[in-house]
Amino acid sequence: MRMSVKAASVFPLRRHLLMLVVAAVVPVLVFATVMVIVFGRGERASTERGLRDTTRALTLAVDREIETSMKALEALAASLHLDRDEYNTFERHAGRVLPTQPWWRAIVLTDARGEVILRTARVGARGTRASLAGRPYFVDMTRRLQPALSDVLVDRTTGAPTIEIVVPVIRNGRLRYGLAADLEPAALSGFLASQSLPSDWTGTIIDRDGFVVARSRMPETWLGRPVGALLGRLEGPAGWIRGVDGDGVAAYAAYSRSAFTGWTVAIAVPAETVDAPLRGSLLLAVAGGLTVLLGGALLALVVGRRIARPILALVDAAEALGQGRAPAHTASAVTEVNRLAAALEAAARDRDRFERALRDSEAQLRAVFSSTLDAIVVLDDDARAVDANPAAEDLFGIPRERLLGRRLHDAALPGDVEPLWLGLQTKGSLVGGLRLLRPDGSERDVELSATAHVLPGRHVAVVRDVTARRQVEEDLRRREREATAMADLSRRMNERLDLDAILRLVCETARELCAADSAAIALPETETPDVMALRHRVPAEDPAPDVARIERGKGFGGLVMTTAQPLRSNDYLGAAVLVVPIVDDGVAGLLYVANRARRPFGDADEALLTRLSEQATSAIRNARLLAREQAARADFEAANRSKDDFLATLSHELRTPLTAMLGWARMLRAARLSPEQATRALETIERNTLWQAKLIDDLLDVSRIISGKMQLERQPVDVVGVVGAAVEALRRDAEAKGVALDVVLEPGTAVVNGDPVRLAQVVANLVSNAIKFTPAGGRLAVELSHPPGEAIVTVRDTGAGIEASLLPHVFDRFRQGQRGRGAGGLGLGLAIVRHIVTLHGGTVSAHSDGLGRGAVFTVKLPLSRESRGPVIGAGPRTVRAARPLEGIRILAVDDHPDARELVGVALADRGAEVHTAASVSDALAALEDVAVDVLVSDLGMPGADGFALVAQLRERERTDGRPPMVAIALTAYASPHDRTQALAAGFDLHVAKPVDPDALTDAVVGALERARCLSRRVG
């Protein structure tokens, strides 16, 4: 690209170099001048600050001198001679003071009006005794009664300038005299001259009226005269001015006015002194700059001559390069010129290399054009093909000769090319799609990418066949649509719990994705699983064929039920049908789609419908799980309510007997009951205590049942004896309530391998339960039969009966009917019965015809085939002696004093000699002092417990060789594990609290008998 430059701006190289020198030097010269001015102004400002500071210092010095004179005059005014009007003596005193004040010319004493009384002057000093009355400074002194200073005065006799200071002489609070001192102005001028000011500086003191008080230069000329024009323009307390001084010389002046005296001190400096350095610097800068500029111009002319010749040679070389010739070699002393010459030579070599590369590139481009798989067509402005590669012949389906000259519009669907061609003309490029029509009638989807004006009037179009890709994209869109529909179906299924609504969604999705006319789902009938009935269809008025009723193995759907495999037909009852099974532990349903137009279904439809059937399976499973969960939740809520009811009942059942026991006990303590009432109180306390013990035993049994720790001590047991004894033990309760109790026991022996205590508990629970729910006047019958192989116990009453809704749960823990809550109890007895009977391998059942019609409980126990050892419950009951423990020495150990006293009293009442101890240490000490036959000890005690006690006891017996003492553990720890632990520790018997005194006595007697039998065997 050529650059055009105006002729007026074209200069020789030498002139350019000269302009370069000027352009470089002139800014430096301007900068130097500016800096000289700036520095000069800074120096002038520094001079101004210095002069201001000097005038301020001189002002303060003058103030000090004046103030010193005032102080000295005030000291003289305090003379006692003035108090006594001794004027002569005072005059001599003043005469002695006057030589000590170099500035004073005379001392004057006046009366209060200003009339001179006396005047004392220096030797040779001239002056008059003129009155001071009416003078401004004297009037000011008399008014303020403060020292006052005059401005410059002219003596009336001599005409010499003078200055006066006057101070008041006050006696008894009023002005009596005035004492003044005449000052010598020449002394002030000498003071200024002594300040070492430069010789050309002028210091001046000016009074309030603008007259010269003192001057450092030519004071005799200026004293008492008005100041010149320069100092006559002073304004403000301080400042800086420029002008012409009184000597007619241009000068700068700094001044400062004293607030004490009102005088102004000024220092004038000749302007030449201040401005001369700045002017000299400016002249030096300008002279230096012009010298540098002239030298630079001469150097530019010399250097320009040396550079111009090689530059002209470079111009010739560039012209040769432009004409295709090799440029001549150019040598120069300038490095850049040599580099430019080398660059021109390299450019010539590169041009040759690029021309060769261009020819190679054209050959490669032609090869690519011919071998590329995409069709490339070169078009003219009328969209006619002027060139095409072989791939274009294949894509358009015609030979190259016929393709050339054919318009692109003729090979595409009508209307496809016009908007693309218009866009190419306006934008210069385009990318778009169209559909080609081949001569054989087939169509191809293509993408057209074209660039306009690659060459003048030529446009290049690249046409790519995307038919296969479009098919893949269509498949992907279909799969995405299916995935979206499936995801939406899953989301909607998760939002709903209604199985029918979910299955309808499955039908709608199947119909939509398979493009079917209708869809349906068939599910098994409840009572006939091998028959399915239509449950859902979409649309509702257009069911699929053969889905009204499907039987296994019959028809199209029946075949799918049998094989559990998908099945499709393109012509089944006039429609295309596809059926897939819904599988969940067998065929749980059928999913249909149908097309009345017989549009066939393919493998993709079958795969899709199979996935939908899996969704239906999931819905069916979820519905089943939901039903189970709801049932389980209902059971849990019922159990939770039962637990709450049980806790409320437990609170009531524990508090009710405690209330009666506490009330009667306090009334007994008050000793206000009759003997009959006291007897009834003791019976009430005993009955409620037994009731409390039974509640606790039931709770412990239920705890053992829940934890699986209830164990049986199995042995041969005669059920006849156990039932008879248990019933007889409750006969008093039945008679007290007015209930007739009948017992029918089949003669003979019915031996069961079981636990006699637990079997007696079963009978007692059933009989006491029947007594509780049978009103007075009712009847209760207990029957025992033992047909071959089993014993059957039946408890039948005519009482309240059992509600129909409660009957299936009558043996559940914590379950009571409304009547049960009113009758008392915890509702645990029947649950304990069922568990004990189950542990014995038997069964228990309940029957009732309804409320108010009584109830029947039946227990069936398997009989034992063989009997080993003695049979419990068959012999006669033993009669207890009145004092069975006569002569037995017993040590009772318990940390609880009430329990310890009860055991001692109960055993002593039965003939024993009882000793008591509150701790293990007390017990060991007692064993040292007393020979004891039986140890009855608590287990849980603070410090050392019952286990430690029995361990030390057995250790002593082994060490001393004594026979083992009978040891009984009497404790509130009543679980089977506690019993086993106590026996393992060395106790002979484990008895649980609370214990009846008779039962405790029997335990002691039984333990002693076993010990004696064992002793006889060993002996």
Image (spheres, rainbow, N blue to C red):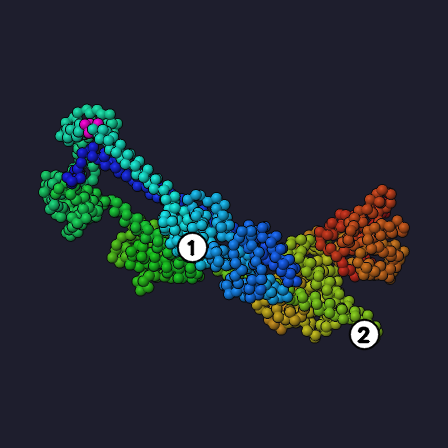
Left or right of 508, for residue 64:
right
Task: Classify 10 Å Cα crowding around label 2: few (below 14), some (14-19), many (20 and above).
Answer: some
Q: Which residue is mark 1?
A: 225
Query: Which circle marks residue 677 in the picture?
Result: 2
- Residue 494 or residue 344, whichever sits in front: 344
Image: magenta residue range: 306-310
Kindly state the secondary structure of the residue where label 2 is placed.
helix
For the point 81% across and 61% down, the residue is 898
| Image height of 857 relative to 308, above or below | below
Left or right of 963, for residue 423:
left
Label 2 or label 1, whichever comes before in sequence order: 1
| Image height of 751 relative to 1015, above or below | below
| Image height of 688 relative to 789, above or below | below
For the point 76% across and 49% down, the residue is 983
Left or right of 787, for residue 237:
left
Say if residue 640 shows up in the picture: no
In percent of width and height, residue 833 lies at: 66, 60
In percent of width and height, residue 731 lies at: 74, 68
Query: Which circle marks residue 666 in the picture?
Result: none
What quarter of the picture does the C terminus occupy?
top right
- Residue 745 or residue 88, whichever sits in front: 88
Q: CA distance from mark 2 to mark 1?
A: 146 Å
What quarter of the picture does the N terminus occupy?
top left
